[in-house]
Image (cartoon, rainbow, N blue to C red):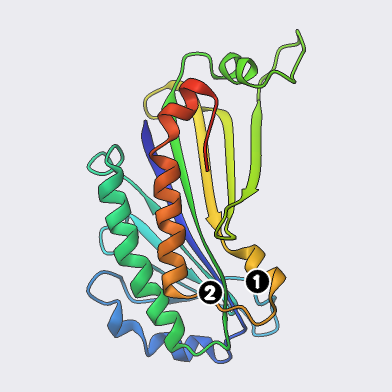
Amino acid sequence: MVIVDTRYNVLFTKILNMRHLILGQEGKLKEEFMPFQVLSIPDEAPMEITRMITTTKYGHSTLQMSMVGSTFCTTYDDKYNTDWEKCYNYLDEKYKKIYDVIVELQPERILTQGFVLNVFKENPNPISFLRNKIQILQTEQHLSTLICKFATKTAAGFTVNVQLSNAQDTVANAEGLLIQIETNDILSTKENNSYVSTKETAGQLLTNLSEIYSKLDSFIDSGVLTI
């Protein structure tokens, strides 16, 4: 099983004068990140559009900032992509630094946070595999794409989304399953207008993600995932 990439997403209330403020926070990131690139986006453009972007010095991760959110994307090389503990520790370190920088920008509230993990597992016939797992699908027609997705709410109130689809590893030229896991606290924001997503919340979400990852092999073998 190969860890393809991860994302750490944050949504917050609108930050005014964001470009000026974020440049004042570069010192907290300079040991690991390149200077921010300021994009030529007019102020009247939608708030969700990325205004600033930076990458880690080794080029594995990208941090994008808009006026109302940020996304930290990481692609893992062969030194990391079969070792979840290394990936987990990397994410754990980076999300804390990013969260601290966002708080310094003084948004009124951090609305929601979430992690996304994409994993590839080689399988010579992924569509047949998924069809056998999804008994409700009955057709003799050829399928070029098959996607299975479900969402649930944990006891802690977090949302978990799991998606399986057939995919191809273009580097290894291999067929297989692409498994995407997402954990977030978006329901808490929808259910409580004064909810604040904290650094501790992000830690719980990452732990939740890690627990699900540890069950993937069993899930693929048995078709049962306990969350």
Residue 63: tell me if it is visible: no
In the rendered image, which residue does mark 1 sit on? 189
Residue at 33 percent across and 82 percent down: it is 26
Residue at 52 percent across and 34 percent down: it is 225
Give the residue type at disc 1: Thr
Give the mark nearest the N terminus, 2 or 1.
Answer: 1
- Quarter of the image for residue 138 reads top right
Furthest residue toward front: 155
Q: Which x, y percent locates residue 30?
A: 26, 77
Q: Do the residues labelled 2 and 1 touch (CB within 8 Å)?
A: yes
How many callouts does the rendering have? 2
Give the residue type at disc 2: Ser
Which corner quadrant holds the N terminus? Answer: top left
Question: Mark 1 packing: few (<14 Cα in 10 Å), some, or many (20+)?
Answer: some
Residue at 44 percent across and 33 percent down: it is 216
In the rendered image, which residue does mark 2 sit on? 197
